[in-house]
Amino acid sequence: MTADDSFGRLDDDDYPAYTMGRAAEMLGTTQSFLRAIGEARLITPLRSPGGHRRYSRYQLRIAARAREIVDQGTPIEAACRIVILEDQLEEAQRINAEYRRSAETANPTAAA
């Protein structure tokens, strides 16, 4: 990978740019928390060629949301399930909005 390829990925939310230590530091949590949400299958970090966990910005946002819920006293497994359900709801709402827009475009008189 050239330097130009690497710079092009700086804006990629899914690029696994952060080591476990750096991710934990950014989230203000421990590495064991990141391992626990991985075991709960909330996020699956990618692995470097050396086998080290690497996290993307998208995964860090998901982990931060789980941490907020855990900090409110919810067990980690339940927090992970809540985050998964929130994500599924958001996706369903996005798809629903797309269907509505498509229906309105296909039949503009029905929307009036």
Image (cartoon, rainbow, N blue to C red):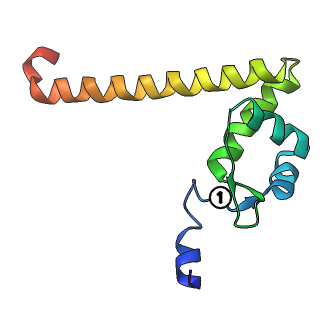
Q: Position of residue 83 (x, y in %)?
A: 66, 26
Secondary structure state at the residue bearing disc 1? loop
Residue 69 lies, with reference to residue 57, above or below; the image says above
Q: Residue at x 43, y 23 (%)?
A: 92
Residue 102 lies, with reference to residue 55, above or below; the image says above
Q: Identify the image quadrant of residue 51.
A: bottom right
Left or right, 36 with respect to 3, comes to right
Residue 96 lies, with reference to residue 28, above or below; the image says above
Left or right, 29 with respect to 78, comes to right
**Which quarter of the rendering shows the N terminus?**
bottom right
Q: Position of residue 84 (x, y in %)?
A: 62, 25
Q: Position of residue 42 (x, y in %)?
A: 68, 33
Q: Residue at x 82, y 54 (%)?
A: 20
Where does label 1 land, which residue? 16
Figure label count: 1
Left or right, 6 with respect to 109, comes to right
Q: Residue furthest front?
A: 50
Q: Amino acid at mark 1?
A: Pro
**Which quarter of the rendering shows the C terminus?**
top left
Counting other residues with Cα less than 10 Å from the Cα at mark 1, is it few (<14), some (14-19), or many (20 or more)? some
Q: Is residue 100 visible?
A: yes
Residue 23 lies, with reference to residue 94, above or below; the image says below
Q: Identify the image quadrant of residue 43.
A: top right
In the image, 37 versus 72, the foreground residue is 37
Q: Position of residue 47 (x, y in %)?
A: 70, 57
In the image, 19 versus 7, the foreground residue is 19
Q: Residue at x 71, y 46 (%)?
A: 60
Q: Identify the image quadrant of residue 19.
A: bottom right
Q: Is residue 29 visible?
A: no
